[in-house]
Image (tube, rainbow, N blue to C red):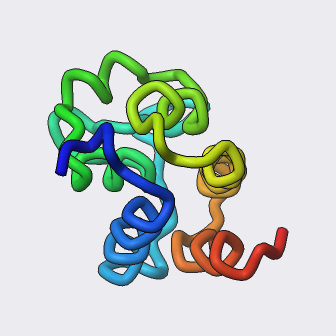
Amino acid sequence: MSYEETTDEEFLRVLQGVVAEQPDRVYERPGLMESCLYLHGDEPGCLIGHVLLRLGVHADKVRAREGDAAGDVMRDLLPLVSPDLRSDMDCVQQWQDGGTPWGQALEWILGGEG
């Protein structure tokens, strides 16, 4: 399956896998950056970056979107993902930037709390 065919269910499955590996991870910005980076060099940085690479999005496509909101990146690269999930991931990105552990962010997505 191509990443362009990713559905909400597949995105959430990959998201859960990433978070299961590091549920207590708190994103750390490199240097003096004010927002997260999808990639740190050639490695995934923020939670969304991890998921995009695991879905098979090439690092160059991700790198080209640095500074763009998660929902906008998902809209353009993962066209089958719903607007609701894209909006949720915008919130997750903001929470992450504010120091929320990845496991808590996942609980919010799965439980619809916020």
| Vertical position of residue 39 compared to residue 84: above or below | above
Q: Is residue 88 left or right of residue 63?
A: right
The residue shown at (45%, 81%) is 23
Which residue ends up furthest to the top in the rendered image? 64
* Residue name at image x 67 percent, y 43 percent: 83
Q: Compared with residue 6, is residue 62 higher up or lower down, i.e. above or below?
A: above
70 sits left or right of 4 in the view: right
Q: Position of residue 44 (x, y in %)?
A: 27, 47
In the image as oriented, which residue stretches furthest toward the right?
114
Nearest the viewer among 41 and 83 is 83
Between residue 61 and residue 67, name the one nearer to us: 61
In which quadrant is the C terminus drawn? Answer: bottom right
Which is nearer the eye, 76 or 80?
A: 80
Of residues 87 and 20, the one nearer the viewer is: 87
Q: How many marks?
A: 0
What residue appears at the point 31 percent right and 38 percent down from the top-left corner? Answer: 4
* Quarter where residue 108 is shown: bottom right
- Above or below for 3 versus 13: above
Would you place residue 98 above or below residue 35 in this image?
A: below
- Residue 60 coordinates in the image, percent (x, y): 20, 22
- The residue depicted at 23 percent of the width and 38 percent of the height is 57
User: Relative to 12, is 44 on the left or the right?
Assistant: left
Picture quadrant where residue 25 is located: bottom left
Q: Residue 88 location in percent, x, y?
A: 69, 54
